[in-house]
Amino acid sequence: MKIRIKDNTVRYRMSKTEVSQLAETGAIWSSTVFLDGVFRYGIETTEEETLSASFQEGSIVLRMPEAMIQALVQTDIVGFDGISGPVKLLVEKDFVCLDKTDEDQTDNYPNPNVMC
């Protein structure tokens, strides 16, 4: 799972396996280990109807409705957005990049902008 933060926007991107894991277990987490602490970020299922997020003890948790998770699994929907207080939230499927990258993209979704 990737996270991108710019000002008051937080964007999550998930691979195929991560979307499946979220649907099966109800949560996925990733972390970055620094010398003086760990930054964690994750997505958890919520019974609410909208996306929400909180930041506590060095962790960002995005709460995603079950219906949205199932839509990612079962349809071609790319993602969802929402607002949590002053923060704009985006959660999306991670597509294979069109430009060259050294990043492993074998578990990413096929990019819909590729012409065959």
Image (tube, rainbow, N blue to C red):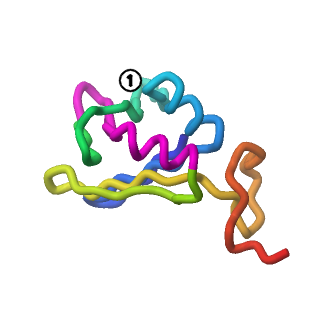
Q: Quadrant of residue 99?
A: bottom right
In the picture as drawn, the residue positioned furthest to the left comes out as: 85
Q: Is residue 78 above or below residue 17?
A: below
How many discs appear? Answer: 1
Going by the numbered disc 1, the residue's amino acid type is Gly
Is 20 left or right of 100, judged from the image as shown? Answer: left
Say which quadrant the C terminus sits in: bottom right
Q: Quadrant of residue 8?
A: bottom left
Residue at the image point whose x is 72% and y is 69% from the top: 98
Q: Which residue is mark 1?
A: 37
In the picture provided, is 43 more to the left or to the right than 106? left
> What's drawn in magenta, residue-wise?
55-74
Task: Identify which residue, 15 or 5, lies in the foreground.
Answer: 15
In the image, residue 56 above or below residue 98: above
- Residue 18, position in %: x, y? 58, 36
Residue 93, image x, y percentages: 56, 52
The residue furthest bottom is 115
Q: Residue 88 placed where, x, y %?
A: 27, 58
Residue 63 vs 108, above or below: the answer is above
For label 1, the crowd category at 10 Å Cα-Cα, with few meaning under 14, some 14 to 19 and many 20 or more, is few
Residue 21, position in %: x, y?
56, 29
Quadrant of the rendering where the N terminus is positioned: top right
Circle 1 sits in a helix, a strand or a loop, which is it? Answer: strand
The residue lying at 16 percent from left, 56 percent from top is 86
Residue 82 within the magenta-colored segment of the rendering: no
Q: Residue at x 53, y 25 (%)?
A: 24
Which residue corresponds to the image point at 49% horizontal and 30% vertical from the top-left?
30
